[in-house]
Image (cartoon, rainbow, N blue to C red):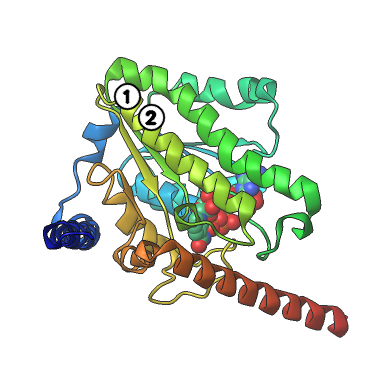
Amino acid sequence: MVCQCTLNTLAYFALSYIVYRFVWALYTIVYPYLIASPPDLHKLAGGKWAVVTGSTDGIGKAYAFELAKNGFNLLLISRTQSKLDATKEEIKKEHKNVEVETISYDFSDANLNDYKKEVLPAIEKRDVGILVNNVGLSYDYPEILHKVDGGLQHLANVGIVNILPTSILTAAVLPQMVQRNNGVIVNISSSAAYAKMSLWAVYSASKAYVNHFANILRNEYAHTGITIQTICPMMVSTKMSKARVSFFAPNTTNYVRSAIRTIGVIPETTGCIQHQIQSMIFGLPELVLDLLITKNSQAVRAAALRKREKAAKAQ
Ligand SMILES: NC(=O)c1ccc[n+]([C@@H]2O[C@H](COP(=O)([O-])OP(=O)(O)OC[C@H]3O[C@@H](n4cnc5c(N)ncnc54)[C@H](OP(=O)(O)O)[C@@H]3O)[C@@H](O)[C@H]2O)c1
């Protein structure tokens, strides 16, 4: 028979763990978003240039605008030159003193020689203070692995775009950041990294890579003054999410304004207070969480397929 004192000890341990989890969750909501004052970004960065990938739309474009507002010169790397030109013009109109350079590169191209020819020299010759690894690719709608829209090619692209540029560009800016002993690297991951997202296998797993990668780098470069941050958004209203603006799906400007204030404050966060509150759901027991996520993914898939069918009939 188990004695009463063993049971009491176990109960105390369980209670302490629950209290710890609750206090930690509260801290991650309250401290970065309501208490901490943002550190001087230029001091953290050390260099005058900010590199932003996937910067002609959505979250990346909002980071570019916010960094320009903070006085950083911009190197924008994205897929479509016409969109890069339009984004550059928009930024220059609002922030005349900021230099903006662009590189069009399709990050589904995994050829290292192309990186070396088209992307890396522009990074290496500038004093890059901030790198925002934002570019990312998702599915059109949730689906089990072998039925994902776009087939094997799309699965390959999601893996490549979500993992490779973050790894390569980070490795390319680190030498100068190490030499200066400062610099900021922001990796835009996703809250999909926090759970086993059924029907989003490659997307969710590739975002888990981004979180894991940043966690390891924080250890590897712990002796330097380099800031490495991971941002794990829930839903932000963009072309990718197709979500309408709401309290829980902020527009990109408000979202990024909030996220940027947390650089140097917290190493990993969702980016805004409402997402941080929502993310408490990931504290649920795994069994319950898996069930909820699967049900939700299946409902989103059913709605997407109904919409498709309707559109096909209307043609
Ligand atoms: N929106 C959300 O709710 C949400 C939630 C969690 C995580 N995230 C993450 O946040 C990041 C940004 O997402 P977003 O919603 O802002 O996306 P978005 O609105 O679709 O914008 C994506 C940007 O990346 C560029 N891009 C896409 N594929 C590219 C490629 N192969 N090569 C080069 N550039 C490419 C796009 O350029 P083009 O327009 O020329 O294609 C565009 O500028 C992603 O990493 C995403 O996973 C977003």
Q: Name the amino acid type tagged 2.
A: Leu
Q: Nearer the viewer, residue 296 or 54?
A: 296
Above or below, 118 relative to 67: above
Q: Is 59 left, or right, of 315 in this rendering? A: left
Question: Relative to residue 118, is residue 288 drawn left or right?
Answer: left
Residue at 43% across, 43% down: 211
Which amino acid is tagged 1? Answer: Tyr
Instruction: Give yes or no for contact between labels 2 and 1 (Cβ–Cβ under 8 Å).
Output: yes
Q: What residue appears at the point 38 percent right and 45 percent down from the top-left corner?
A: 230
Q: Is residue 100 above or below residue 125?
A: below
Q: Residue furthest front?
A: 1
Task: Identify which residue, 169 or 198, lies in the foreground.
Answer: 198
Q: Secondary structure at mark 2?
A: helix
Please state the horizontal and vertical placement of residue 275, each as a whole percent of the image.
Answer: 36, 65
- Identify the image quadrant of residue 147: bottom right
Location of the C terminus by quadrant is bottom right
**Residue 136 numbered tag:** none
Which residue ends up furthest to the top in the rendered image?
179
Specify the quadrant of the image occupied by residue 116.
top right
Residue 138 quadrant: bottom right
Return the residue at label 2: 217
- What residue sits right under mark 1 in the picture? 221
Residue 173 visible, this orientation? yes
